Image (cartoon, rainbow, N blue to C red):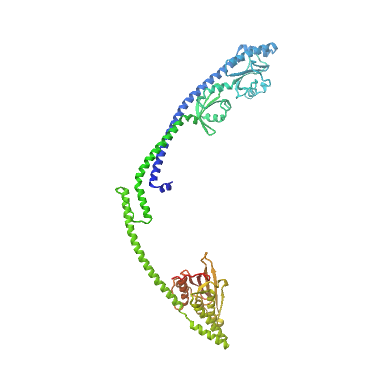
């Protein structure tokens, strides 16, 4: 980001930074205002929601308490109890008919007195009773039902509530909430408990809850096990109970939060004193804050309008600030193209005016320096051309002088005549000697060419060694190892004979034993198009002392002549350095008393390739 800002133009920086600051400020301000407005809406809703839920809880407690009172009144009614005891103690037809009538009448009063009651049913060990309004489900057996099983498992409870289910006692299969009371009858001691089942209408509870739906998105009643009794389905009721547990306050309405399907809800809960059921009221934040949607849109529109107005004003101000800088930038671009005569005139004395004056002064100085530089360059060119010409003539003269040390044309013709005369008279050794010397001088001449093939150079040094072999006899032996593929490579002429001569006179001649000279050539690959030709002349002579070897190699590396005795090898080294460059030349290796090796390094140039002489 920092690099991005640094690369922006000054005008763009002003627009970007100030615009960004304004936009962030306006956005943060709008969000903050919306946040506080949302908090106020939520706070007001919570206050009202607690009141509504408390009112609803009181209503349901009142209705359920009325049912409870009617049930208690029934099981404690003297007439009802006497009729039932008479029948149970003497279960004949007469008493049963009377008991059925009395029970039907009492149950009918129980159901008609409270619209919340759906149906009722009495079970005794001598038979069951109903009000004969609904059609019985004769497959229902109380002793095998979950009602009876629940009392067997939790016998201490006189009253038990069961979760919402389909009606099992009657055939209409409505959704009901069973309420069972276990009771005893004074005067009947031969049997066990009797049971009164009162089933509440789930639809009536839903109707009561729906009256408060305008305040909540969802309302539901849940028992202590988290089982839904009435209200909205599709809600994780067990999770609701877990959420509400930490905020229970002696049964009063409490609030918490709940999330389902990525929707956040405000949850309010209260507990029914009559049954211990929990009532939950849910309101999604989205629906609660829906009234603020128009405010959010208004804030966004206002922010955009203010931002655009500020941007236009900022654009006008930045244009006035950067117009002069833009013109100066254009002048600089012209100068960058090489025109130093352009100038920038600005009438005011502010920072831009100071910059303009500095710019003009700089151009004046540059123009003066450029003119002076041009004059200096021309003078340097003239001096360089003069020095180059002098050096060229000097090196040509040196090269000619080095090559002119041997100019044996007349000797070559004379030796040819001697060779023929010796052959005619049978003087074979003289013939070989003169023939070798003739080849030696012929190659030395080489028709005036500076560069010859490696084959000719090998032939030249071979002629020399043949002559020396006749002179020294068995004391001098030699061999030459050069691959035929290297024979046509081009080399400077007269570079091997001085090395062979140096091996003889400074190595083998002073040694008592027979001497060997070994000449070898090889191609060394450096990289593509930059191969080297390396030629070595090895002898098993006296060798060179370590200090002397260092001096010789130092002189060779620096183009110096070490002594008159070594003039030949320094001559060869200097010719190579002058012709090919200072990276080429001669190097010596030696072990005193054992051997000496002279190593020539040349560029690998095949026949037909052009060789550029360095002057």
Q: Position of residue 574 (x, y in %)?
A: 45, 73
Q: Quadrant of the C terminus?
A: bottom left
| In the displayed structure image, the side of residue 83 where residue 439 appears, left or right | left
View extreme (right): residue: 92
Residue 266 sits above or below residue 542 on the image: above
Residue 504 sits above or below residue 191 on the image: below
Asked where in the image residue 76 lies, by quadrant, the reply is: top right
Q: Position of residue 306 (x, y in %)?
A: 39, 36
How many numbered circles are shown? 0
Of 513 and 26, which appears nearest the observer?
Answer: 26
* Residue 440 visible in rendering: yes
Q: Position of residue 198 (x, y in %)?
A: 61, 19
Asked where in the image residue 155 lies, by quadrant, the reply is: top right
| In the displayed structure image, the side of residue 475 where residue 102 appears, left or right | right
Q: Position of residue 114 (x, y in %)?
A: 57, 16
Q: Residue at x 55, y 87 (%)?
A: 422
């Amino acid at each position: 980001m920092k690099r991005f800002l640094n690369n922006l133009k000054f005008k763009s920086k002003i627009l970007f930074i100030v615009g960004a600051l304004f936009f962030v400020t306006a956005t943060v301000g709008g969000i903050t205002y919306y946040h506080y407005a949302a908090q106020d809406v939520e706070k007001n809703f919570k206050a009202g929601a607690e009141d509504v839920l408390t009112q609803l809880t009181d209503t349901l407690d009142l209705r359920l308490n009325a049912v409870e009172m009617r049930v208690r009144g029934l099981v404690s009614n003297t007439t009802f109890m006497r009729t039932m005891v008479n029948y149970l103690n003497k279960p004949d037809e007469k008493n049963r008919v009377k008991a059925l009538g009395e029970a039907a009448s009492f149950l009918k009063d129980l159901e008609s007195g409270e619209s919340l009651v759906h149906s009722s049913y009495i079970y005794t060990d001598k038979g069951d009773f109903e009000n004969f309004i609904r059609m019985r489900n004769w497959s229902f057996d109380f002793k095998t039902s979950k009602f009876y099983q629940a009392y067997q498992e939790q016998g201490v409870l006189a009253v038990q509530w069961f979760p919402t289910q389909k009606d099992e006692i009657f055939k209409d299969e409505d959704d009901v909430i069973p309420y069972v009371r276990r009771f005893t009858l004074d005067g009947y001691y031969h049997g066990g408990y009797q049971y009164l089942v009162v089933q509440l209408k789930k639809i009536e509870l839903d109707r009561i809850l729906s009256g408060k739906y305008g305040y909540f998105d969802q309302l539901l009643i849940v028992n202590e096990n988290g089982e839904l009794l009435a209200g909205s389905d599709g809600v994780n009721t067990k999770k609701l109970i877990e959420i509400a547990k930490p905020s229970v306050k002696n049964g009063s309405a409490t609030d918490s939060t709940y999330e389902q399907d990525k929707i956040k809800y405000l949850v309010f809960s209260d507990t029914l004193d009559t049954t211990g059921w929990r009532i939950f009221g849910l309101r999604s934040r989205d629906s609660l804050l829906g009234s603020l949607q128009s405010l959010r849109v208004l804030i966004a529109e206002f922010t955009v309008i203010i931002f655009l107005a500020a941007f236009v004003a900022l654009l006008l101000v930045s244009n006035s600030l950067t117009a002069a800088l833009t013109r100066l930038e254009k002048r600089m671009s012209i100068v960058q193209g090489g025109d130093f005569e352009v100038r920038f005139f600005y009438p005011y004395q502010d920072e831009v005016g100071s910059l303009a004056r500095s710019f003009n002064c700089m151009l004046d100085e540059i123009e003066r320096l450029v003119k002076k530089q041009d004059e200096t360059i021309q003078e340097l060119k003239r001096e360089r051309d003069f020095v180059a010409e002098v050096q060229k003539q000097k090196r040509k003269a040196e090269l000619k002088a080095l090559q002119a040390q041997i100019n044996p044309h007349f000797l070559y013709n004379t030796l040819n005549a001697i060779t023929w005369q010796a052959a005619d008279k049978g003087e074979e050794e003289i013939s070989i000697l003169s023939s070798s010397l003739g080849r030696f001088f012929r190659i030395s001449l080489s028709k005036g060419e500076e560069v010859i093939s490696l084959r000719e150079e090998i032939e030249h040094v071979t002629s020399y060694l043949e002559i020396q072999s006749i002179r020294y006899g068995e004391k001098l032996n030699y061999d030459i190892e050069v691959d035929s593929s290297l024979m046509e490579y081009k080399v400077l002429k007269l570079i091997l004979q001085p090395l062979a001569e140096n091996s003889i006179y400074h190595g083998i001649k002073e040694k008592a034993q027979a001497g060997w000279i070994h000449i070898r050539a090889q191609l060394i690959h450096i990289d593509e198009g930059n191969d080297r030709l390396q030629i070595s002349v090895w002898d098993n002579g006296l060798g060179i002392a370590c200090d002397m070897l260092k001096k010789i190699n130092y002189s060779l590396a620096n183009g110096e002549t070490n002594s008159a005795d070594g003039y030949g090898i320094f001559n060869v080294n200097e010719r190579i350095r002058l012709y090919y460059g200072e990276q080429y030349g001669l190097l010596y290796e030696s072990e005193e008393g054992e051997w000496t090796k002279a190593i020539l390094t040349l560029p690998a140039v095949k026949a037909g390739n052009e060789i550029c002489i360095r002057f």
